[in-house]
Amino acid sequence: MLFDPPKDLDTTVFARIPDKFRIKGRPSPWVEVQQGGRETDCFLEGPSFDLAGNLYVVDVAYGRVFRISPDGGDIDLVTEYDGEPNGLKIHKDGRIFIADYRNGIMQLDPDSGAVTPYLTRNRLQPFKGVNDLVFASSGDLFFTDQGLTGWHDPTGCLYRYTTEGRLDCLIDTVPSPNGLVLNLDENLCYLNVTRANAVWRVPLLPDGGTFKVGTFLQLSGGHGGPDGLAIDEAGNLVVAHVGLGSVWVFSPLGEPLYRIRSREGLATTNIAYGGPERRTLYITESESGCILQCELPTPGRLMYSHM
């Protein structure tokens, strides 16, 4: 099938982590492994908005969470703790959940900065290294367990943790599961598979299982692959392509509609819709430690935290 070429869109800088929060000379096991020891003063991920319009982002490298004011002018350090926070989502009751690569699923109290365990093991088995998370409208929590998996070790997992406290492993054969989002009907989970440079389509059955998992998008290029995911009110899928300095917008049929180009580095890691009408896409660009923004014609889907 032939598609029209995607329309190019540019970005502007919404906010940048100030120098006072840039860390230099501190050992970080995450930086040693994931960045090959390259100088890294922060590495942003996990953008998510609270009801007041503040944007939360995490710093995976140094166990920190920042809060950015709605106008981007004020950046506060909410917490710094012994962990590697990668994904962050805000529950509609105000609780903040973190997918922490080192510790599992954690909770953050934004007032005190306390980070406490929420779900740290599958029965008695530690997770490989959780990566990202999303809530269904029912309150069920879906999250990925990536670790260092890839085509050499396709054992990454997609989990669902129900409001009744049941943990289901939906898939355990994924070569690097990363960002995830539910479709508008919530009978399907889109899953970024970074090392395969692909987006998978994971049907969700009424009995809680899944079947006929397949590739929805096969991407190319870059030095990474698809990372964060979002969806808009029309069901268009928004894919942050780390290593390519781009964010793609695809129709529900997989047609490429837009390519949003970073005006900073190539590490476009994750995305979130925000702004008064949710028409602004916010992008963490981790090489430069900044958050980019781009206006889009279709509002982002209303997240569970705002329902």
Image (cartoon, rainbow, N blue to C red):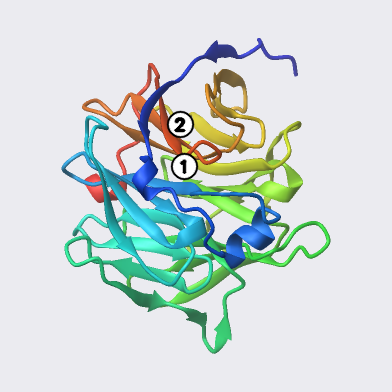
Q: As displayed, is residue 101 above or below residue 48?
A: below
Q: Secondary structure at mark 1?
A: loop
Of residues 199 and 145, the one nearer the viewer is: 145
Q: Amino acid at mark 1?
A: Asn
**At 66% across and 61% down in the image, what residue appears?**
32
Q: Measure how far apart labels 2 and 1 are at the Cα level.
A: 7 Å
Q: Position of residue 33 (x, y in %)?
A: 68, 61
Q: Earlier in the sequence, mark 2 or mark 1?
A: 1
Residue on which disc 1 sits: 183
User: How many labels, in total?
Assistant: 2
Q: Position of residue 147 (x, y in %)?
A: 64, 66
The answer to the question of whether label 2 and label 1 lie on touching residues, with beta carbons closer than 8 A, is yes
Q: As displayed, is residue 203 above or below residue 106?
A: above
Q: Position of residue 257 (x, y in %)?
A: 56, 18
Q: Is residue 174 visible?
A: yes
Residue 235's tag is 2
Q: Position of residue 300 (x, y in %)?
A: 36, 31
Q: Amino acid at mark 2?
A: Gly
Of residues 121 and 19, the one nearer the viewer is: 19
Position of 176 with respect to 17 (left or right) is right
Q: Is residue 162 visible?
A: no
**At 19% across and 67% down in the image, what residue appears?**
112
Residue 305's tag is none
